[in-house]
Image (cartoon, rainbow, N blue to C red):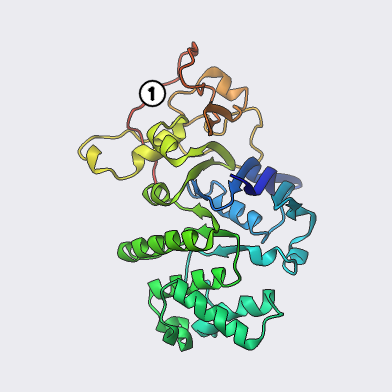
Amino acid sequence: MKNLITARGLTKRFSVQRGLKTHWVHAVDDLNFSIGEGECVGLVGESGCGKTILSRLLSRMIDPTSGSIMFDQVDLTKMPTKKFADSLHRAQIQIVFQDPTESLNPHFTAFQAVADPLRRLMSNLSAAEVEEKVNQAFDDVGLPRALGSRYPHQLSGGQKARIGIARAIAVEPRLLILDEPTSALDVSVQSTILRLLGELRAKRGMSYLFVTHDLEVVRIISDRILVMYLGKIIESGPANQVFENPVHPYTKALLAASPDPARRGIKTQRLEGSASSPIDPDPNVCRFAGRCPVEMSNCRSVMPPLIEVEEGHHAACHRAEPRGAQVTHLPSRKPAFPNSGVRQ
């Protein structure tokens, strides 16, 4: 599969002033990954792990501290955010925001909301061509064209979600970043929107970065999964491999914490403590140290690199090893857990 977008060493840090000293929040820390053409990559992790910041970096809403974002062999980080807004690539990367109500201009009708990016990013279109593209977007997301004259307060949550998607796809993007697009919707509406996204991807050939807390959702829609923890990707791989054979202790904890009727009545162990501070983290200490139930002594002296445990499946853990390899490990700090979880 040809890569559509590739991040290399992607880093975003925010300064925090404490007295006379400047500290740094490592929101996104040295990430390396790619998204292929027509591929859906799911991004999961706890709140505060850096998912939203990564989404805004890729959509070029904010500038990175360092690293590169290659899109079709063009390094998007070479141009500042303001300049990128006027570039030809702006239309090719679009984002669907988490809250469909807050992300719509209350003074715009549904038609105007979808037409606005067309007028801004495809200024060569005539009024008739804009109307045609808006109507096509309405059709693609399953909205009656008659709703075009309504304002956001006159639409249901599901209809507003569809408007948000129609607005993003109207300019014919190649990459669609979905920042928890179903979290604010009822469960029944969520399934409808997920089915719609699957149909749009098949019809338009778009690539997706699907950001979510819901592991079952990401399992259904994603080809590949990235698991983030405190600004780092700690596991990645094909969805079926990550779900059926998780390697990193944090990934195992996430999966054990998700509701599963098969585990009903079985008591699960929760991870102890809370995530460490993202402010000036020690580069030689695993980010998961202190919470990991299988921690070893070198976890606090060497940052584990992402290694390939099987084809396309990587994990950043000192206990990770190629499938079938025989390695003698140091004694763990605590017993391993088969059914532990994390607080969500």
Task: State the residue position of label 1.
Answer: 336
| Image point (47%, 77%), residue name | 138
Name the kind of residue labelled 1 in the image. Answer: Ala
Residue 145, quarter of the rendered image: bottom left
Residue 184, quarter of the rendered image: bottom left
Locate residue 285, reporting x and y percent: 61, 28
Is 287 situated above or below 118? above
Locate residue 136, reporting x and y percent: 51, 77
| Viewer-nearest residue: 68 or 127 | 127
Residue farthest along the left direction in this orientation: 265
| Viewer-nearest residue: 342 or 252 | 252
| Image point (49%, 43%), residue name | 225
Q: Secondary structure at mark 1?
A: loop
Which quadrant holds the N terminus?
Answer: top right
**Camera sees residue 45:** no
Locate residue 221, reporting x and y percent: 42, 52
Locate residue 65, reporting x and y percent: 73, 49
| Image point (70%, 44%), residue name | 23
